[in-house]
Amino acid sequence: MTLTPNYNPLPVTLREGHGTTVTDVEGRDYLDFLAGYSAVNFGHSHPRLVEAVAEQAKRLTLVSRAFDHDLLMPFANALTELTQTEMMLPMNTGAEAVESAIKAARKWAYDVKGIEPYRAEIIAAEGSFHGRTTTIVSFSSDPDAKDGFGPYTPGFITCPYGDAGAIENAITENTAAILVEPIQGEAGVLIPPEDYLPRLRELADQHNVLLIVDEVQSGLGRTGYLLDQWRVGVKADLTTLGKALGGGVYPVSAVVGRADVLGCLTAGTHGSTFGGNPVACRIGLEVVELLKGDYLERATKLAPRLRERLEAMVEQNLLSGVRTVGLWAGVDVHPDLGLTGREVCERMLQCGVLAKDTHGASLRLAPPLVVTEEELERGLDGLEAALKGDLPS
């Protein structure tokens, strides 16, 4: 065996993808209802993104941040304008963006807020998923992600997700920031009370604490909004972006937000060899332009049908719970069926639909935002057939 067994993928080996369809090495087609955890929001092999990569790769790929290049400032300007923020820090992966936001928050806490050195604390939510670095798993409540990787990084306090009162009680003079997902994707697309994020914004303002919102999965169109925080009328101090920012063809991430916070990261205090490289910036610029199209409207338009179909499965006692927003859903398999989420995904595979389980008997559904109404119906047909056991012979 030559590959580390840190994944347990479904028994399918893919070789090609276009739009919402992927093809395996034996030529079988599947409808993608995961979209790389929202990284492939614009579909597989989007022609504009493929062309952008090819064009830029022939011209300039990497110079490191030791030098400027002609696309770095244009990308920074385009992304901050799109997200209505002041400053952008380019990175590569979502976890790197979150790590960078944590570092910026701590630097701001010491340099600006005046917290005693090495005493800054960040409040996070139980059930969160912000990445798999040793710092991030230190405040994870998922034993699979956390156990066996200590000693853990101090400086984090966790509170129940959706409970603004618990966070209010946890704030002290050493609190630098509150870090949350507007919707917990890995946990099963858990949607907090509508006043949760607005209340956290109020608490942050009241106590001079930063609000950091992780939009790596929820952002850039998945919920029908450019940023899901806008759905509830909130503007974070720092927002982490990733996945879809690279269009599914390249790792691109960023932290966007207040200049007085990100500006604390002065020369030599933080960096990345590949962050903000020319290829990443070229793709990012194309993604910004794509997001000016009809992707958000498509997610909003198809959202009611997604929910309607899933609620019908609840009425049939196939599902016991459904959570949807935009083109994103978390569903719980009805316990009477005696099926795990993994088993349902294996059955869906037989029906030509790819999805991903999470935490026992739950699944996540996240088709690319280019999905048509017919494809959406076909994917949901596959889920229903899997739950009923109506599998192709």
Image (cartoon, rainbow, N blue to C red):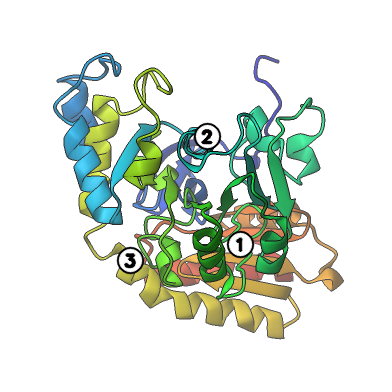
Q: Which residue corresponds to mark 2?
A: 110
Q: Which residue corresponds to mark 3?
A: 296
Q: Secondary structure at mark 2?
A: helix
Judge the density around disc 1: few (<14), some (14-19), many (≥20) Cα neighbours within 10 Å: many
Say left or right for 163 vs 63. right
Do the residues under discs 3 and 2 have CB atoms within 8 angstroms?
no
The x, y position of residue 228, in whole percent, is 44, 63
In which quadrant of the rendered image does the C terminus lie? bottom right
The x, y position of residue 1, in whole percent, is 71, 15
Q: Quadrant of residue 160?
A: bottom right
Q: Secondary structure at mark 3?
A: helix
Viewer-closest of 24 and 157: 157
Name which residue lies at 58% across and 52% down.
178
Do the residues under discs 1 and 3 have CB atoms within 8 angstroms?
no
Q: Could you tell me the amino acid type at mark 1?
A: Val
Viewer-closest of 198 and 31: 198
Say left or right for 120 vs 241. right
Q: Is residue 153 placed above or below 121 in the rendered structure? A: above
Give the mark nearer the N terminus: 1 vs 3. Answer: 1
Q: Could you tell me the amino acid type at mark 3?
A: Leu
Q: Could you tell me the amino acid type at mark 2?
A: Tyr
Q: Which residue corresponds to mark 1?
A: 189
* Residue 75 visible: yes
Q: For the image shown, how many numbered marks are present on the structure?
A: 3
Name which residue lies at 69% across and 80% down.
314
**Gap in angstroms between the C-alphas marked 1 and 3:** 18 Å
The x, y position of residue 115, in whole percent, is 58, 38
The x, y position of residue 237, in whole percent, is 43, 52
